Image (tube, coloured by chain):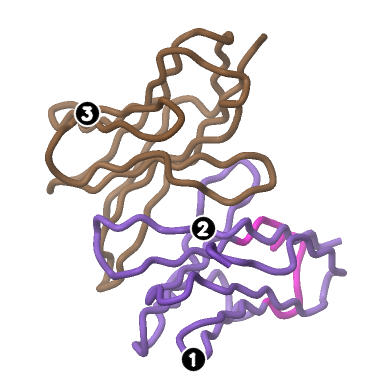
Chain colours: A brown, B purple
Amino acid sequence: AQSVTQLGSHVSVSEGALVLLRCNYSSSVPPYLFWYVQYPNQGLQLLLKYTTGATLVKGINGFEAEFKKSETSFHLTKPSAHMSDAAEYFCAVSDVVSGTYKYIFGTGTRLKVLA
Amino acid sequence: GAGVSQSPSNKVTEKGKDVELRCDPISGHTALYWYRQSLGQGLEFLIYFQGNSAPDKSGLPSDRFSAERTGGSVSTLTIQRTQQEDSAVYLCASTPEVSLNTEAFFGQGTRLTVV
């Protein structure tokens, strides 16, 4: 079964600084990868997804992620952090496990943006 | 409503009581998931419904947990004889089709606190 690892349960950046949230997956076949954001007391909202094609994927709110097969990574970046980006971010991969389509999530990274 | 709706948004219950959590998926979505999000952990898969097929219950942590989906739409997650370790946010998600490259649409969750 596939797994997802998010390095850093907490990340702090200054407002205007680069945001880099790391995600690595384990897969022997091309994966389908997702980044979700969760604001306080809300559900998960899709930021972006990689299925096939271009390895640099652009999402909402200025975020983007690059699929690197050689590194089994799908790191999320944003050039300039805003206070409103403070939230928890989850990387996920979809897989078929015992005949069931499942989303396998990392443990999440909580992003703090400092004024 | 355009999104996945969950009720109640918050539930406080006494240890040993039964609780029911409701999920109303997006109209027309064929697949429905329940996940549990505990503090400091990722999302734990609980159960999956797809059309009229038998649900995948492989993620349910004990026989105190059960779920049903009536008429291929609304789902209810029931926890009997609640324990303090059941305290978590329970998230419901639905997808329009069964496919690895389709993202899941999440509700805002039900925060369950067992006292």
Q: Residues within 10 Å of mark 3 (few under 14, many from 20)?
A: few
Question: Which residue is labeled 2 in the image?
Answer: B106
Q: Residue B97 at what x, y percent from top left? A: 30, 70
Q: Residue B79 at what x, y percent from top left? A: 68, 76
Q: Residue at x 30, y 54 (%)?
A: A94
Residue closer to the observer: A25 or B31: B31
Spatial separation of the CA atoms under disc 3 and disc 1: 41 Å
| Label 2 secondary element | strand
Name the quadrant containing residue B88: bottom right
Residue closer to the observer: A94 or B44: A94
Spatial separation of the CA atoms under disc 2 and disc 1: 20 Å
Q: Quadrant of the N terminus of chain B?
A: bottom right
Q: Residue at x 43, y 45 (%)?
A: A46
Q: Are marks 2 and 1 in contact (CB under 8 Å)?
A: no
The numbered dot on residue B71 is 1
The region drawn magenta spans: B79-90
Question: Which residue is labeled 3 in the image?
Answer: A56
Spatial separation of the CA atoms under disc 2 and disc 3: 25 Å
| Label 1 secondary element | helix
Discs 3 and 1 share one subunit: no
Discs 2 and 3 share one subunit: no
Q: Residue at x 56, y 81 (%)?
A: B74
What amino acid type is highlighted by mark number 2? Phe
Q: Residue B44 at what x, y percent from top left? A: 50, 57
Please, which chain is the residue tagged with disc 1 on? B
Name the quadrant containing residue A75: top left
Q: Residue B115 at what x, y percent from top left? A: 86, 61
The answer to whether residue B88 is magenta is yes
What amino acid type is highlighted by mark number 3? Leu
Q: Residues within 10 Å of mark 2 (few under 14, many from 20)?
A: many
The numbered dot on residue A32 is none
